[in-house]
Every structure is written in C-alpha cells, then in structure tokens.
Image: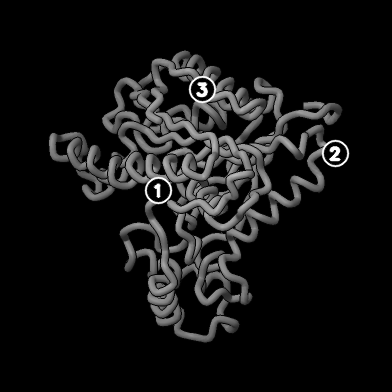
Amino acid sequence: PEPAGKRPVVVWIHGGAYVTGGGEEAWYDTARLAEEGDVVAVTITHRLGAFGYFSPAPCGVKNPGLEDQLAALAWVQRNIAVFGGDPENVTVFGQSAGGHAIASILGTCERPLFRRAILQSAPVGMTIEQEDAQIRAREFSRALGKPLLAASAEEMLAAQGRVLAAFNRGLAFGPVGVDTLKPAVHPDARLDILITWTRDDAAPFVALKHRGNAYGGPVDKLATRIGTRLHFSGPCRTLAANLQSRHQRVAAYEIAWRPQGCRYGACHCIELPLLLGSRSVWQGAPMLGNAPWTELERFGRQARALWAAFAFSGEFPRPTAWLERRV
C-alpha cells in the first residue's frame, strides 16, 4: 500500500526444510495479501543448510540462519514505519520450516519482536540436539574432505547434498539446541498465536517413498493419517497447550480443502496458493488437481481476509468449509 498511514505488518518466513527456497520466490509473492488486506507485507531470505546451521557454526555464531531471521525482525522494527507499517503490530507467518522457525523464535525469546504469529504445517516436534548436530557436522566434514575455510560454496553445497542423503528422516539442518515444543515467551508478552495444519499434511512425504510409483492405496492413506498426526497435528496441539499454559492466546485449525482430482488430498502446502503467489505461478501444480481456478479465487479471498483480520486485531478465523477449528 501507499507509505502513508500505520498499517499492520506481516512478515513471511518461507519453508523448504531449511535447505531450499527464498523470500523472493514467485510463489511467495505477497502482493494480493497486501492489496486486499491493506497490510504491509515483508518477505525475508536467510541462510540455509550448512551455511545457516552447520555445527560448529562457520562464523562462530550458533544458528546463523535463525540469527538472520531475528535480524530481519529487528530491521522491521527500525524501518517499517517508512513503508506505512506499524512496528507495534507485526505478525510473523511461515509454513513448514518457516513455521518451525517461528516456533524456534518462541523457544528462545522471552519477548519476540512481533505481536502475533501464524504457524502453518510446522513440524514442531522435530528438534536437533547438540549431539545430533555434531554427528551431522562430522558427516559434513568427511563429505567436504578439506578444511571449511578452504572450501568453495559449490563444494559446501555438494557436501550438504551428501549429508541430506544420509539423514533422510526429519531435519538434517535446522536450529540446534532449541526445543520447539517448549516456548520461552514470558507470560506478560501477550502474544496471539494461530496454528494450522492440513488434514493430509503427510501425503507428499508418503508419496516420496514410492519413488515415482502411484500413491493413493489404503496403506498410503493410513500412513498419511499416522504421519500427519505424528509430525504435524499432534505436536502442534502440544505446542498450543504449552503456549496457553504460558498465558498466550492460541487457536489451532485444520485445513480440510481437498481439490478435486488431486490424489494427495489436503496435503502439505495446499494453503499456499490461497494466500500467496498468482494464477500464473500455481496453475498446473499437481497438488491442485483439476480444481477450477474460480474455487481457488473464492477460497483464496477468504483465506487472505482471515489472515489479514488476524494481523489487524488478533481475531481468530471463523470456521469455514475448508478451515475447521481444533483448539
């Protein structure tokens, strides 16, 4: 919007298992959210993989990628008023690893630099203890085969790829030594927290195990239900309860939209085309099946309005045909 005024601010932290993605990606474009919701939208890019979470950290800083996110939030506090934003009304929102990153901030900061937060499909039960990080660091060093300071970025990425292949369960890289289920926020912080997951969150991860073969049989559906409960809905409910015990306002929702013609159902990332990006970016995405774009526009306008309303005042979304309250 125009820089005059004092609008709510929304800050997007992208997902990608802490190894892929960036705030400048086209499918994370916040233009529609900013225009329709009359909010100032910020996207950030931060160090990933071995560059952001190698332990011991190359630059001597623990979790440099997480420090990047905190630095971005500090930048927003100092500068967003120039763009018409209200630094006292900041909502940070993120999906998958982006939501996990927000939980990491909640797990390390008593008074985070935001008023509200939206965590979408965050695998908050996945943590990397210092011992696990050291195992990954040794594997990375072996894969690199030379002193870290003598390695090129390309060599570091190649070594990172070998670590990812070796650790194909959970998070190979990410914040180290942070319990994302145990918030450190002070009870007086008075945050508003919105947590969501999708009904079939685990479907793409189950499908990956087929290595190109068909997904959709009874065993797949059972594995999806179990995986969703184990890695997404269950830990998210636990985090919600722990936040409530620290006197924060919390609500949790399940996204139930299953596009017609999509074998993966209401899968991981299904809400992203409703909130971000454009038709030219998302049309043809396999997870959208053959759903008519008019349906995406209808649900998308609802989603963007609900997220913006939360950013304005902390108003929790009213349940809809595709969004069901769980906590």
Report the disc number at residue 123. Answer: 1
CA–CA distance between discs 2 and 1?
Answer: 35 Å
CA–CA distance between discs 2 and 3?
Answer: 30 Å
Quadrant where the N terminus sits is top right
Sequence-earlier tag: 2 or 3? 2
Quarter residue 285 falls in: top left
Counting from the top left corner in percent of width and height, residue 31 is at 66, 29
**Nearer to us in this view, 126 or 283:** 126
Q: Residue at x 56, y 28 (%)?
A: 278
**Nearer to us in this view, 79 or 239:** 239
Q: Is residue 15 left or right of residue 263?
A: right
**Residue position marked by numbered label 3 in the rendering:** 317
Please say if 251 is above or below 15: above
Counting from the top left corner in percent of width and height, residue 266 is at 34, 30
Q: Residue at x 38, y 71 (%)?
A: 132
Quarter residue 149 falls in: bottom right
Counting from the top left corner in percent of width and height, residue 106 is at 55, 50
Farthest left residue in view:
218
Q: Is residue 286 left or right of residue 67?
A: left
Report the disc number at residue 94. Answer: none
Between label 3 and label 1, give the one nearer the viewer. Answer: 3
The answer to whether the residues at label 3 and label 1 have Cβ atoms under 8 Å apart is: no
Counting from the top left corner in percent of width and height, residue 190 is at 62, 39
Sequence-earlier tag: 3 or 1? 1
**Residue position marked by numbered label 2 in the rendering:** 82
Between label 2 and label 3, give the one nearer the viewer. Answer: 3
Q: Residue at x 68, y 38 (%)?
A: 90
The answer to whether any part of residue 137 appears in the image is yes
Amino acid, disc 3: Pro
